[in-house]
Amino acid sequence: MSRGDPLIRLEGVGKTFDDGTVAVKDLDLEIEEDAFVCFLGPSGCGKTTTLRLIAGLENPTTGEVFLRGRRITDWPPQRRGVGLVFQNYALFQHMTVRSNLAFGLEVRGTPRREVARRVQDMAARLDLEEVLGVRASRLDLSTMQRVAVGRTLVAEPNVLLLDEPLNNFQAGLREQMRAQLKSWQQQFGRATIYVTHDQEEAMTLGDRIVVMRDGEVEQEGPPEQVYGRPETLFVAGFIGLPPMNLLPARLDGSTGRVSLADASLELEAGTKERPSGDVVVGVRPEHLLPVEGEVDGRPRLRGVIDLVRPMAAKTIVDVRLEGGTTVRALTRGIVRGEPGEPVTLAFDPMAVVLFDRSTGLRID
Amino acid sequence: MSRAAHGRARGWARLAVAAVVLLLMMLPVIWLVSLSFKPPREWLATPPSLIPRNPTVDNYVVLVAPGIPKGTIGEVVGAAQPVTRAFVNSVIVVPLATLASLGVGFLGAYGISRFRVGGNFLPFSVLATRMFPPIAFAVPLLVYYRSAGLIDTRLGLILMYTAFTLAFSLWLLKGFIDGVPRHIEEAAILDGASRWRVLFTITLPLVRGGLAATGLFVFIMNWTEFLFALIFTSRTALTVPVQISQYASAVGRFYGPQAALGLVASVPVLVAGYVIQRYLVRAFTFGLVK
Amino acid sequence: MGGLGGVLGLRGGNRPPRGLRHQLIYDDRWFQQLMVLPMQLIIWAVLVVPLLIALYLSFVDWQPISGLEWWQAPFAGIENYRRAILDPRFQSAIVRTVIFVGAVVSVEFLLGLALAVLFNRKFPARRALSSLLLFPMMLPWVVVGLIFFLVFLEKGPVNYLLRVGFGPAASVDWFGRPLLALFTIGLGDVWQWTPFMFLVIYSALAAVPPEPVEAARTLGASDWQIFRRVTLPSIKPVILIALLIRALEAFKIFDLVFIMTGGGPGTSTESVSLYLYRTGFVFGQLSFASAAAILLLALVLVVSWLGLRPLRRELEL
């Protein structure tokens, strides 16, 4: 165990189930100590399977798993010291909260007094003292969640794995619980891997986000990078509410000019020569501004309003461009407008991301 | 990969253990089958053989035509009576009692499931008929039956079997009816259908499978019932299990025909049991365990 | 609002009175009562009235042989009860049956549990084997009795195997000695009903959700700890129900004893049911049998109430 080893390392890990479904393909991933990493992706993208591979509940068909530099691919979950909080919490329904919390310590043969002390301590920190004697089957959702988290943390795992723990909550409560989770993580200081399909959750919670799709990592990095500099078309279309506008265009490699259906824009000076070809222009909705007339030299798109959706502090305007594609603009405040009204949208060329249409990768 | 191979080896080990257990379990039945095809000389022959040396179907023939004069078997089982009467009785009594039990049980189950008529008391009092040893009911029922002239009649048995399988019909069907969402019925009622119409054209078809499973189970219970048949029938209305016991306790030791009769009597219930094996847990526990 | 008043046309006034036919078809309350009517009749006919008759009979001295009808029989007070309680044959039949039930149900439970655990993991031909395993419990009791009678005959296959294994003297008279005879009957019961325990536990195990088990694994529990502390407790209610039902059922045992030993040698294998059958129907002491039956009902009621208590605690908490 050398110092520089990451907490968890996956090397070429793949998982194919008995029925032939490929859940995870050739995954390379490193999780640092104390990190809060979110696995984000649509359902079926392999994020939960990855979690289970780390926990040891699944065995990879290819590749190796390392814990602080030690190869643990063949270790059963019991040996790994990995705490997993299940989506439905998987509490021991027939036990009291106290027994649930004590379980992980007891099965490892921790002395009775020590168990009692640590359970008491955990109950105090998670505000569970009053329900210690209650059967798990009688708890409400948020208490169940606290018990589930407490049950894993009390055993002091190397890493805490959370599988969509907020899925069962209603919208309002979700935000509250999110804040709670974040504060626990800071308080307990455990490396945490958090699986979710909710990008808001991932954005607010994660120090790092791993965007997955079809069993592969599309992009990983800090939230602002995943949001601001999506590496693939998929990430660009998946992240953001509403997601990034993706417009087909052509790049003239020699001049560095990108021509859209309606507007053309110069690429930043100093860009190296590129082959000409079909590209996709990505613009975040908040970078599209409805403007009156020709105010400045910024590139603009002309079209008619399709739909105006005021959402209190902001408004989403759907605009059908002359070429037929629809883009979304996100503006502050309430914007009035009738469907059918002509509108001009301006955008900052600096905020634009270009993708190669055939590979789906970003062009710098 | 070695892990998978390891798992497969374990699977085969489990299969081996299970097969041995099953074989041990089957042995007595295999012996019964073998015995039923043996001529009298081999019934108690030493050493016994699992496969009859001179296989014969005489043991089966003698069930329907006793006293066949020639050969050893006729001499041995000359005293045996034909089993046809018992089979005719069972074939009449058991299905009728089963249908009656289903009918009463279905109506009751519907009333209890939908309206909770009779609260908790009614369904549990039905359960009580199964909780106590049936012999305890036999004495007072004998008093009834004597004055009503129902002793040794098929009707008497049908009534009795209807009553004592009601607990199964009621509780099992209640479970199935509970599974039919109320709002389907409510929609039909809003459309103007009467309660009866809803019951027979909406609910009944929806629990058809449950009805069939319950019916087969009640059939098994009725077909195998022994105590009441023993007490309340003698010559005219005797059923198959009573016939078996008469064979078994007869003075003549005609083991071959006994085995044959036992096997023949078991076939209907084995078939029924196989068909409803998915429901057996539910059935034996009155639907308390699903 | 319908009810009796409606039927009799007593309801005043403006609305046309609704006919009986209409009531029967549309009025829920009529409908509800009609639904349970046949069932009620049966309950009265086979539960309530018979119990009352039995109660009555238990306090008179009626023997059909005397020529008197049962309602003419002389009052006997608690004489029948006194005799029943003091009857050593009745006492030993009860004790014997209770011990028998305890023994066979425990064995069936343990074997059933072991088989269920064996079948709880996938292996080749699992489905086929498990459904094959169930057939004994479908067989008529009398046939099971017949099978075990034939197999344990003095010149039967079991004794032959014993002689082959342990020499010519190893042959056993299975039905000739009380304990051996009881053991043989118990074997028949275990053979027939272990599949029931297996089936109940097996399906309960299959219904245990995988997540708590996985959670226990990540928390460091060994397979044995998981089984003892997570899996088994979560199917405990089902096990309790199965044990209770099986025990009540085994307590009724009659057919096997009747076929295999007829209660013999002597009365040494007589079960409670067989004892009552003999006193009531063979010897015609119906009053005495009634008193014994009432005592038996009381006993079953108390025992099953006690048996239900842990179950209720389990299900309510």
Image (cartoon, rainbow, N blue to C red):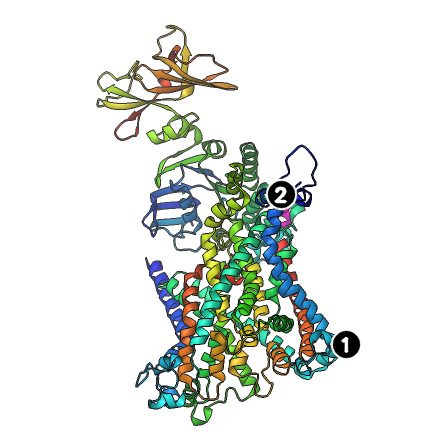
Q: Quadrant of the N terminus of chain B?
A: bottom left
Identified by mark 2, the residue type is: Arg
Who's the residue at 56% across and 49% down the image? A151
Q: Nearer the viewer, residue A230 or B112?
A: B112
Chain letter for mark 2: A
Q: Nearer the viewer, residue B181 or A329?
A: B181
Residue denoted by label 1: C75
Answer with left or right where residue C89 lies relative to residue A182.
Answer: right
Mark 2 and 1 residues: CB-CB less than 8 Å, in contact?
A: no
| Residues drawn in magenta | A118-126
Relative vertical location of residue B195 with respect to residue C184 in this rendering, above or below: above
Find numbered disc 1 in the image and state the secondary structure of the residue it sits on: loop
Local packing at callout 1 (Cα closer than 10 Å; few below 14, some 14-19, many 20+) is: some
Q: Does residue C89 belong to the magenta stretch?
A: no
Relative vertical location of residue A256 with respect to residue C142 in this rendering, above or below: above
Q: In the rendered image, is residue C224 in sight?
A: no
Relative vertical location of residue B166 with respect to residue B228 in this rendering, above or below: above
Q: Nearer the viewer, residue C74 or C22?
A: C22
Q: Which mark is residue A125?
A: 2
Q: CA distance from mark 2 to mark 1?
A: 75 Å
Q: Quadrant of residue C306?
A: bottom right
Q: Nearer the viewer, residue B151 or C255?
A: B151
Q: In the rendered image, is residue A172 in sight?
A: yes
Q: Does residue A122 belong to the magenta stretch?
A: yes
Residue A249 place in picture, x, y as percent: 27, 20
